């Protein structure tokens, strides 16, 4: 039988009394962001150095106690909180948050896992560089969590996911050893590329403690436009025009269904959403130009003229200044928050070839209407990279909790069956966590699942790293 008090005492000696929490209000660590589940930690441990992380992992390993690494706890798939058994240690990386180095000549930044994404963005900008990962949770999510979930966000269309931004990692392995792979090298073909095993592994293979990431020169101008479009087909057509006119300058392309925007109008009336209700969809897109603001504006005008001529845009506004641009982006980023205010909801974070998204939505809308009449469809997301947040809210006036409990399974099954037929992915950017673990087993080939289990068995044979997340290991 594990001696909980003895382990707690050991952990206190390793990281300091103040950084081992065992009572009081631990909701921030034990409840997931969507307020779906609440776990109970044997202890919340907050190491401040990589060496302390290694010592904690070793101590837990020796005691046979599993660990749940946690960054900002903004994950969407219930992967970053302890289970309800009270036998797991929640390892918070929040104190391990230094920016170790910004290397201008190499265009890299080396940063610790607990650094909040927005803090890193601001530090790079202060030195004249862009760290281009951007998502609505950037004020609380951390670099370690972004890497562990291979986060996407609103600039993937130009810069790729977190994976593409990572050049090197420092990881504490499940055995409590430190792998230091913090190279800033763009080329290093010396055996298996271990960083890519840990990126997207959701805390199930090791604890990411630091990373060396790509930075880019700040653009001379970043212009934002908000356009009303008559259909999803028109949005896809506008995307094609934007690629043609802006090429590498296209750094964001998000689509928003009118019901999704309606939730922002309802819950955040102070945000004046343009074109209220005039079209079934709106798009917010961004042009980053390295020449000048006037050049960027000219390009946008040419693009919007062509789009108006071709009828794929009904109306559009181009932000006159940074404040207006931020306000337009804030509307898009407020959708998940407005959804949370509206109540518990069923999320489908899916990706499909861009060209096939309109047909997918037509088909799955009709099926949901037929089998679950009255559900409300909150459809929005990163159309630029084929990732849709096809979310389902309970019918107006229905009990959201009961709806989630009773209908999530059947609705997921229906939606994911169509995703499969469209050769899509059932998790584009949020990962699997515990929420989609059974779905993964159903939607991934046995060959892929066996290879994943082999990797998990090799790197974490005792299954102490975030067990029950991503894979079910007996
Ligand atoms: P946590 O939630 O703390 O952890 C997430 C997972 O990573 C868990 O499995 C955890 O065990 C593991 N983990 C955390 N830190 C480490 C570490 N150092 N080493 C090993 N494993 C670790 N996601 C997107 O991809 N794109 C979006 O556009 C997006 N928008 C969002 C908008 C809102 C409003 C919210 C609330 C969330 C959004 N998310 C989005 C989801 C979430 O923000 C991302 O998954 C983010 O990367 C999680 O970072 P975090 O630090 O909060 O990680
Ligand atoms: C986003 C948030 C999750 C959701 O805002 O891009 O990833 O579906 C989403 O609400
Ligand atoms: Zn997203």
Image (cartoon, rainbow, N blue to C red):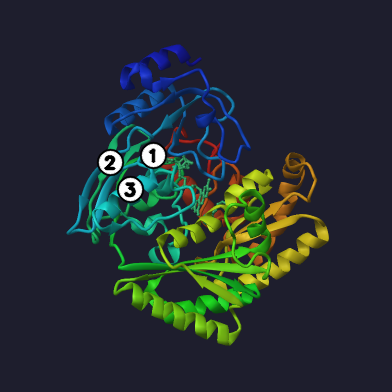
Q: Nearest the camera: 240 or 414? A: 240
Label 1 secondary element: strand
| Residue 319 falls left or right of residue 228 | left
Q: CA distance from mark 1 to mark 3?
A: 23 Å
Q: CA distance from mark 2 to mark 3?
A: 23 Å
The image shows residue 45, relative to residue 327, as above or below, that is above
Identified at 71% across, 47% down, the residue is 408
- Residue most extreme to the left: 105
The answer to whether mark 2 is within 8 Å of ligand 1 is no
Label 3 secondary element: helix
- Is the C-beta separation of discs 1 and 2 under 8 Å? yes
Q: CA distance from mark 1 to mark 2?
A: 10 Å
Q: Nearest the camera: 26 or 4? A: 26
Tag 2 residue: 179
Residue 120 disc label = 3
**Quarter of the rendering containing residue 119:** top left
| Residue 457 falls left or right of residue 423 | left
| Residue 357 placement (x, y as % from top left) | 61, 70
| Residue 148 placement (x, y as % from top left) | 43, 46
The quarter of the picture where the C terminus appears is top right
Q: Earlier in the sequence, mark 1 or mark 2?
A: 2
| Residue 177 falls left or right of residue 393 | left
The answer to whether mark 1 is within 8 Å of ligand 1 is yes
Residue 361 seen from this side: yes
Q: Earlier in the sequence, mark 1 or mark 3?
A: 3
Nearer the camera: disc 2 or disc 3 = 3
């Amino acid at each position: 039988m594990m001696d909980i008090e003895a382990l707690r005492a050991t952990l206190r000696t390793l990281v300091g009394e103040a950084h081992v929490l065992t009572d009081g209000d631990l909701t921030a660590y034990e409840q997931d962001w969507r307020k779906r589940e609440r776990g109970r930690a044997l202890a919340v441990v907050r190491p401040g150095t990589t060496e302390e992380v290694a010592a904690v992992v070793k101590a837990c390993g020796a005691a046979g106690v599993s660990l749940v690494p946690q960054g900002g706890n903004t994950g969407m798939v219930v992967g970053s909180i302890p289970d309800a058994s009270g036998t797991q240690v929640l390892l918070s990386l929040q104190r391990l948050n230094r920016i170790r180095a910004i290397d201008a000549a190499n265009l890299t930044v080396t940063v610790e896992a607990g650094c909040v994404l927005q803090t890193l963005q601001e530090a790079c900008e202060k030195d004249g560089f862009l760290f281009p990962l951007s998502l609505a949770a950037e004020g609380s999510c951390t670099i370690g969590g972004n890497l562990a979930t291979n986060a996407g966000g609103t600039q993937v269309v130009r810069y790729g996911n977190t994976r593409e931004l990572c050049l090197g990692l420092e990881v504490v392995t499940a055995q409590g050893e430190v792998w230091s792979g913090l190279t800033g090298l763009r080329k290093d073909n010396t055996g298996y590329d271990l960083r890519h095993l840990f990126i997207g592994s959701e805390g199930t293979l090791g604890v990411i403690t630091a990373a060396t990431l790509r930075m880019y020169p700040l653009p001379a101008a970043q212009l934002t436009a908000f356009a009303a479009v008559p259909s999803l087909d028109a949005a896809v057509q506008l995307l094609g025009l934007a690629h043609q006119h802006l090429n590498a300058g296209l750094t964001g392309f998000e689509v928003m269904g009118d019901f999704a925007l309606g939730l922002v109008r309802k819950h955040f009336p102070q945000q004046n959403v343009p074109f209220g209700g005039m079209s079934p969809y709106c798009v917010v897109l961004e042009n980053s130009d390295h020449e000048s603001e006037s050049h960027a504006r000219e390009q946008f005008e040419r693009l919007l003229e062509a789009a108006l001529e071709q009828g794929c845009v009904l109306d559009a506004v181009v932000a006159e200044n940074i404040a207006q641009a931020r306000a337009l982006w804030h509307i898009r980023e407020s959708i998940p928050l407005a959804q949370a205010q509206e109540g518990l909801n069923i999320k489908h974070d899916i990706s499909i070839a861009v060209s096939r998204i309109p047909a997918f939505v037509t088909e799955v809308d009709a099926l949901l209407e037929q089998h679950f009449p009255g559900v409300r469809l909150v459809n929005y997301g990163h159309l630029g990279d084929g990732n849709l947040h096809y979310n389902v809210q309970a019918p107006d006036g229905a009990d959201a909790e009961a709806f989630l409990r009773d209908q999530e399974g059947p609705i997921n099954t229906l939606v994911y069956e169509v995703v499969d037929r469209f050769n899509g992915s059932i998790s584009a950017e949020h990962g699997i966590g515990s929420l989609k673990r059974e779905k993964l087993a159903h939607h991934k080939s046995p060959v892929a699942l066996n290879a994943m289990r082999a990797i998990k068995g090799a790197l974490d044979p005792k299954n102490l790293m975030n067990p029950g997340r991503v894979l079910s290991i007996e």
